Amino acid sequence: MSVERGDAGTPGDRVSAFDWDEAQRSLDAHGNALLPGLLTADECAAMTALYAHHDPFRSRVVMARYGFGSGEYKYFGYPLPDAVSALRSAIYPRLVAIANRWNDAMQVDVHYPEHHEEFIRRCHDAGQLRPTPLLLRYGEGDYNCLHQDLYGEHVFPIQLTVLLSQPGRDFEGGEFVLTEQRPRQQSRAEVVPLAQGDAVLFAVNQRPVAGAHGSRKVTLRHGVSRVRCGQRHALGIIFHDAR
Ligand SMILES: O=C(O)CCC(=O)C(=O)O
Ligand SMILES: [Fe+2]
């Protein structure tokens, strides 16, 4: 990657400076890619501080109530905070080519428009009106069960999570975990080591894997292992809206 952690400039400048060809290669090869230092420590602290407020959010979910895990999260409401909205619209266009290529390979007859605004219009026209970006908060003993963030018919196939807390200082444990279920094979797990401010891009649902006889679909799930101590916050950015 061509960006040093905590580089100055705006998050948008940092998005432009990433090596997106490398991110595509990693997404193709592993179903995930790291964006190191997407947010600075100060930006992480400011985002984390929003959690205590009421106004930016449309709802709060206590995960244990639904069997989703332990811990809680809050969905942002519209209008999204500038920082969230800027990341959503700056990162989306970087992922459109790979999303379209994946759909072609999986023979899914859906193509994504160049700009996020246009894709959101498609979601809204189909009744998916509620924003999906979220802040998550885990304390000691909390975890997030393996899941997929599907919220309706319209799905953008890649999402990202930004780790807002600093491992080793703010919390221990709480690793970001992905599993891939390959047809007729057992699931494979991958732990993505994240430092504060790093983002991981990953497949929401399925992705193609090239094989000897064309491509196969594999199914991904993501979650978070048990937080051993301390507090862990994360920002999730999903590009489709929810029903
Ligand atoms: O807390 C995490 O790292 C995972 C959050 C998550 O499930 C998401 O961003 O969709
Ligand atoms: Fe999630």
Image (cartoon, rainbow, N blue to C red):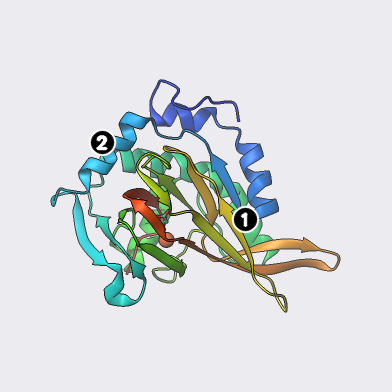
At horizontal 61% and vertical 57% (from top left) the residue drawn is: 190
Please, what is the three-letter code of the amino acid marked with disc 1? Answer: Gly
- Image x and y of residue 184, in percent: 72, 79
Report crowding for label 2: few under 14, some 14 to 19, many 20 or more residues within 10 A (C-alpha): few
User: Looking at this rendering, what residue extends furthest in the bottom direction?
Assistant: 184
Q: Count the marks.
A: 2
Residue located 39% across and 68% down the image: 151
Q: Give coordinates of residue 174: x percent, y percent.
A: 43, 54
Say which residue appears at 55% left-offset and 50% top-offset.
Answer: 192
Asked if ligand 2 lies within 8 A of label 1, the reply is no
Asked if 14 appears above or below 214 in the picture, the reply is above
Quadrant location, the C terminus:
bottom left
Seen at 40% across and 56% down, the residue is 228
Q: Is residue 65 visible?
A: yes
The residue lying furthest to the left in this view is: 54
The residue at the far front in this view is: 229
Q: Amino acid at mark 2?
A: Ala
Q: CA distance from mark 1 to mark 2?
A: 30 Å
**Within 8 Å: ligand 1 and the Cβ of disc 2?**
no
First reached walking from the N terminus: tag 1 or tag 2: 1
Local crowd size for mark 1, using a 10 Å CA cut-off: few (<14), some (14–19), many (≥20): many
Which label was assigned to residue 154? none
User: Is 173 on the left-hand or right-hand side of 103?
Assistant: left
Label ID, residue 31: 1
Dividing the picture into quadrants, the one containing residue 85 is top left
Residue that carries the numbered disc 2 in the rendered image? 46
